[in-house]
Image (cartoon, rainbow, N blue to C red):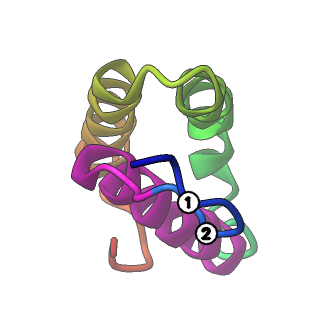
Amino acid sequence: MGVATGHPAPVAPLQAHCAVTLQRLHGWLQASLPQAPQVAGIIPLLVQAVQLYRSGRYDACLAQIQFALGVVTSGRPTVSLL
């Protein structure tokens, strides 16, 4: 059997988890920054997570996301996370 063309490849669960989490964090940042500009400090951490995602390193991406969330939760953001 050959490979079917015209159909997207199935997304691995870890890849999907990273993608959804990054999207939710993006929305959270948009809502949080006006009220708590100090959370902007995690933007470089999330940019790195996106770079890891784009390079297919989903395990490292998820670890980076978890690290960024740890930084945020230690600072007690004013808008609830995810």
Q: CA distance from mark 1 to mark 2?
A: 7 Å
Instruction: Give the main secondary structure of the magenta stretch.
Output: helix
Q: Nearer the viewer, residue 31 or 7?
A: 7
Q: Specify whether 19 is left or right of 69.
A: right
Q: Specify whether 55 is left or right of 10.
A: right
Q: Is residue 30 magenta?
A: yes
Give SS at disc 1.
loop
Per the rendered image, the range of residues in magenta is 10-32
Q: Is residue 63 magenta?
A: no
Question: At label 2, which amino acid type do we have?
Answer: His
Question: At label 1, which amino acid type do we have?
Answer: Ala
Is the residue marked by circle 1 packed among few (<14), some (14-19), or many (20+) residues within 10 Å? few
Q: Nearer the viewer, residue 13 or 51?
A: 13
Task: Give the residue number, with chain letter if any, for mark 1.
Answer: 4
Task: Give the residue number, with chain letter if any, for mark 2.
Answer: 7
Q: Specify whether 49 is left or right of 61.
A: right
Mark 1 or mark 2, whichever is nearer to me: 1
20 up-or-down from 35: above or below: above
